[in-house]
Amino acid sequence: MGYRDVAKVGLGGPVGSGKTALVQELVPRLDDAGYNVGVIANDIMTQEDAQRLQSSFAGRIEKDLIAGVETGACPHTGIREDPSMNLDKIDEFSENHPELDVVLIESGGDNLAATFNPELADYFMFVISVAEGDDIPRKRGPGITQADLLVINKTDLAPHVDVDLEVLRKDATEVRGDDPTAFTNCKAGEGINKIINSVERSVLFAWALALTLTLTSILIATVRTQSRRRSKSTTHNNCNNRLRSVTGNTELPTWLSVVKEITQLDCYQISHGCHITFQEHLTVTQSMNWLQSACRIQLVQSPRATGTVSLSQHAQMHMLT
């Protein structure tokens, strides 16, 4: 297990925008939804945010799954230019907690140019505060324009700082197009569910899809019955040629038999395809490398069920053509 085996969500934004408060709202909801969560708080010279989160999540999240990373320099260096300290910490999390589903990575407070290295964050949100003024989205910093989700926080302060939320909404839409924006008041827990839904849909659900290996209906129809194979002779020949190149067999075997015979994976058929699960004596890397090379397709390992891989329907159909 390592950092590539777990979903990673980054939170960036200026000092005082409410990133830590947002983490305090997100983690309990993710935990209640059944996800195993880890948290990293970046800062320049202190562990203060990490300690605050450890205190906040005491009794809910194991203490060693909440860590601070001291960048020693501008916060963006630790999340973009050189994310190695954060990646090492995620490796440590996943080694000690192989059941881990997702890690939230909070950046130290930074400017509007702060973005996350794609190796560190599968999805990142940029958090700004209403108190910073209603012109922030119009400034079009990379954090504003490139974030998967823009979070406009502390909406309760709008009437006290002479900010029009509709101006913020209009400008965010103009700058970000179809990319989503969420308005939140972490103090009252308002707007948090929209963020949870976005994270689940865009990150966690996408990873969960990789749990199931589905062979296309074309392939299943090809190998299920002799009559169907005759009616699909072109597909049959293409598939047969591919399998011969892999196994040397002259007859058309099922994909499950081929994979099980050569890789010694545990395979079983389901109604719409099959599951392939790695045996303990084979490493994930060895099995995935073989399948990718033999099938000329891309495999994705799920972080929620170690050793399960996914062949996309598109890739499978491409293989048959």
Image: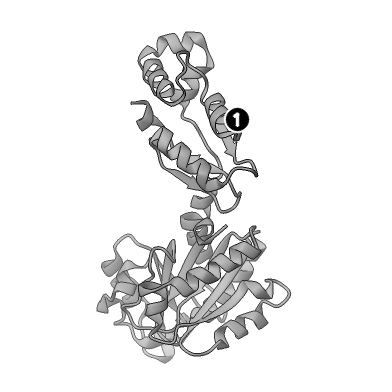
| Residue at the right extreme of this rendering | 59
Q: Please name whichever residue, 61 or 309, is drawn nearer the observer in this view of the structure.
A: 309
Hey, which quadrant is residue 270 in on the image?
top right
Q: Quadrant of the N terminus?
A: bottom right
Q: Amino acid at mark 1?
A: Ile
For the point 52% across and 26% down, the residue is 258
Q: Quadrant of the C terminus?
A: top left
Find residue 13 and report its horizontal and vertical position in percent. 40, 79
Is 3 drawn above or below residue 60 in the view shown?
Answer: above
> How many numbered discs?
1
Hey, which quadrant is residue 71 in on the image?
bottom left
Instruction: State the residue position of label 1.
Output: 270
Find residue 180 and report its horizontal and vertical position in percent. 38, 63
Residue 189 visible at all: no
Q: Is residue 63 left or right of residue 38?
A: right
Q: Please name whichever residue, 186 or 18, is drawn nearer the observer in this view of the structure.
A: 18
Find residue 58 and report its horizontal and vertical position in percent. 70, 78
For the point 37% across and 87% down, the residue is 132
- Element type at marker 1? strand
Q: Is residue 25 left or right of residue 76?
A: right
Q: Residues within 10 Å of mark 1 (few under 14, many from 20)?
A: few
Find residue 30 and report its horizontal and vertical position in percent. 60, 64
Is 39 drawn above or below residue 164 in the view shown?
Answer: above
